[in-house]
């Protein structure tokens, strides 16, 4: 029995029980194909290919997913192939499946990577900050304009975008009533992304759940934090917010 045959026997016997959410789709002398499922939006397929002179040469991996961004799939391919190179001369398939599953478990924002990129590139400016905590599923942003600032915390759960993002104000020097209004509106905008309207108007398309991070961030940063400190009064054309915060 060849080493690949031995590994395939081990895979068929052990793989599904040692990697949560994994289903073996096919096994052959040339490749192994598996599906790894965590949530509806965090699932992928691995096509694991045996090279010539395996296991002295490491496995090649192709990732496919209908829900994950392309750059995330490429990242998983790179991580798993890097892990395979550490295992030259040994069985490699089970370990790289474990690594792929661990990646899904530890990276809460993989389904919204494109939204986060848009927040950073389109909304945040020089002097603004963002800190991302992947395992906790949260990130905090501090946005500024004309001496005013607001620190916002966004939190997602594993079933995002089926569940909406939770948003909190962690600090600000905007007037309290105005800051509260910003947050209440942001919370409501987030809710509307996942909860259908009480009354469906005739002729409107059927309600569909939508990602909520980017629209909420766009409202709070672009329409609130960046807008109000430089807004002008429609009657006198004077700036509505004092430049000197002590006034």
Image (tube, rainbow, N blue to C red):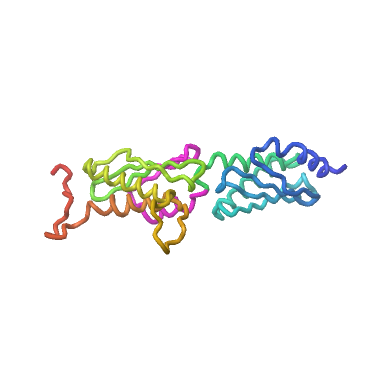
User: What residue sits 79% from the left and 43% below the top?
Assistant: 8
Residue at the far right: name it: 1
Segment tinted magenta in the rendering? 111-139
Residue at the far bottom: name it: 203
User: What residue sits 43% from the left and 41% below the top?
Assistant: 155
**Residue closest to the eye, 41 or 116:** 41
The x and y percentages for residue 161 are 48, 48
User: What residue sits 72% from the left and 39% below the top?
Assistant: 15
The x and y percentages for residue 177 are 22, 42
Magenta run includes residue 216: no
Q: Quadrant of residue 246?
A: top left
**Residue closest to the eye, 84 or 6:** 6
Residue at the far left: name it: 236
Magenta run includes residue 130: yes
The N terminus lies in quadrant: top right
Give the vertical position of 222 relative to 173 (above or below): below
């Amino acid at each position: 029995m060849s080493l690949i045959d031995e590994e395939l026997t081990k895979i068929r016997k052990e793989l599904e029980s040692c990697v949560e959410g994994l289903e073996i789709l096919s096994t052959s002398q040339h490749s192994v194909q598996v599906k790894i499922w965590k949530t509806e939006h965090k699932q992928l397929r691995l096509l694991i290919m045996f090279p010539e002179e395996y296991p002295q040469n490491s496995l090649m991996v192709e990732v496919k997913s209908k829900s994950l961004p392309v750059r995330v799939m490429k990242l998983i391919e790179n991580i798993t192939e890097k892990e395979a190179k550490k295992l030259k001369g040994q069985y490699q398939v089970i370990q790289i499946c474990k690594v792929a599953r661990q990646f899904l478990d530890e990276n809460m924002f993989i389904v919204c990577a494109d939204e986060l990129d848009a927040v950073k590139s389109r909304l945040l400016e020089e002097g603004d900050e963002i800190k991302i905590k992947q395992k906790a599923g949260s990130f905090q942003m501090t946005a500024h304009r004309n001496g005013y600032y607001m620190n916002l915390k966004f939190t997602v759960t594993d079933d995002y975008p089926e569940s909406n993002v939770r948003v909190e104000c962690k600090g600000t020097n905007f007037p309290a009533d105005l800051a509260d209004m910003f947050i209440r509106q942001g919370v409501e905008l987030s809710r509307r992304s996942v909860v259908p309207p009480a009354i469906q108007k005739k002729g409107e398309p059927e309600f569909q759940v939508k990602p909520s991070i980017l629209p909420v961030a766009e409202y709070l940063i672009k329409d609130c934090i960046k807008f109000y400190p430089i807004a002008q009064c429609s009657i006198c054309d004077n700036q509505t917010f004092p430049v000197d915060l002590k006034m």
